[in-house]
Image: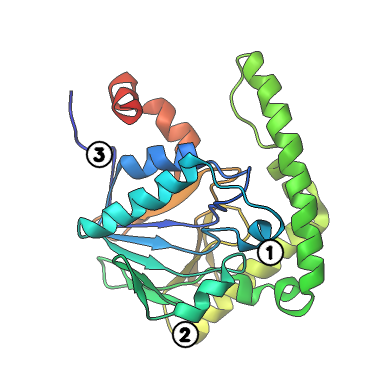
Amino acid sequence: MSEIPAVRCRAAFISDIHLGTRGCQAAMLLEFIRELDCETLYLVGDIVDGWKMKSGWFWPHGHNDVVQKILRLARKGVRVVYIPGNHDDRIRDFCGVHFGGVVVCRDAIHEAADGQRYLVTHGDEFDAVVQHAKWLSFLGDWGYRGLLGMNTHFNRARRLLDLGYWSLSAYIKHRVKKAVQFVDRFEDAMAAEARRRGVAGVICGHIHKAEMRDIGGVVYINDGDWVESCTAVVERHDGTFEIIHWLEARESLGAPVMERIAA
């Protein structure tokens, strides 16, 4: 049985894991990391959910496994860059500090294999709600968690019917006009910042919507999340980028790889 990792790349970008919440898909993320072979791993914000942990402690063993696996990658020589988001904003106080081989940065410039440069940032600083009406952001977060709770029960019923995972909360968000308008404004703001910085594109998270497209000559890339969609972005060794939809990718890996994951 081959021991070659299924996801081999130059750099990987993951965000919005929300460790410390019941919605976190830690088991899925652990599968992905075990199949990941990269030179640099960017943690693009909201890795730990400090907002939720203020109201109650939730930290199962699987969440600790994710942290330990990331630290193990750093010990093995993978460059790990942690860029905090709004849910783990307290970690911004430690920018420039190394934790077990993990360096904390406010944002970063990633140079791809083809020489193109990309701004890497969580994105909350370009969200007017987070910056100017934090109480509304907390209220929205509470409502979002309610949707995720419904999502859990909904997918439990789907499993009983032998149906695959389907995100009810993502479906509702993408169908609500105001949410769609917010996403469009956010993407435009991110592209404008990349243009201002003089880089080819931007790689971010925050809005839990994996996307890769051109916006006025700027490459906009969002790596999604590990609550609903279980997505990551990877840079291949030729400098091209790809969104990995892990829920779909793991199904195509076949029994040998899935057995290795279980082991």
Q: Tag 3, which secondary structure?
A: loop
Percent across and percent down for residue 46 are 55, 61
Percent across and percent down for residue 182 are 74, 64
* Amino acid type at mark 2: Arg
Mark 3 is surrounded, within 10 Å at the Cα level, by few (under 14), some (14 to 19) or many (20 or more) other residues, namely some
Tell me which numbered mark, 2 or 1, is placed earlier along the sequence. Answer: 1
Vertical order, 35 against 137 (above or below): above
Percent across and percent down for residue 160 are 65, 15
Vertical order, 176 against 156 (above or below): below
Mark 2 is surrounded, within 10 Å at the Cα level, by few (under 14), some (14 to 19) or many (20 or more) other residues, namely some
Numbered tag placed on residue 184 in the rendering: 1
**Residue at left offset 27%, top offset 59%:** 74
* Circles 2 and 1 in contact, beta carbons < 8 Å: no
- Left or right of residue 101: residue 190: right
Number of callouts: 3
Label 3 belongs to which residue?
5
Instruction: Name the image quarter holding residue 171.
Output: top right
Tell me which numbered mark, 2 or 3, is placed earlier along the sequence. Answer: 3
Q: Tag 2, which secondary structure?
A: helix
* Circles 3 and 1 in contact, beta carbons < 8 Å: no
**Residue at left offset 51%, top offset 69%:** 84
* Circles 2 and 3 in contact, beta carbons < 8 Å: no
Numbered tag placed on residue 197 in the rendering: 2
**Residue at left offset 60%, top offset 29%:** 165
Instruction: Name the image quarter holding residue 250.
Output: top left
Q: CA distance from mark 2 to mark 1?
A: 20 Å
- Left or right of residue 112: residue 19: right
User: Which part of the image, by quadrant, shows the N terminus?
Assistant: top left
**Dot in front, 3 or 1:** 3
* Amino acid type at mark 3: Pro
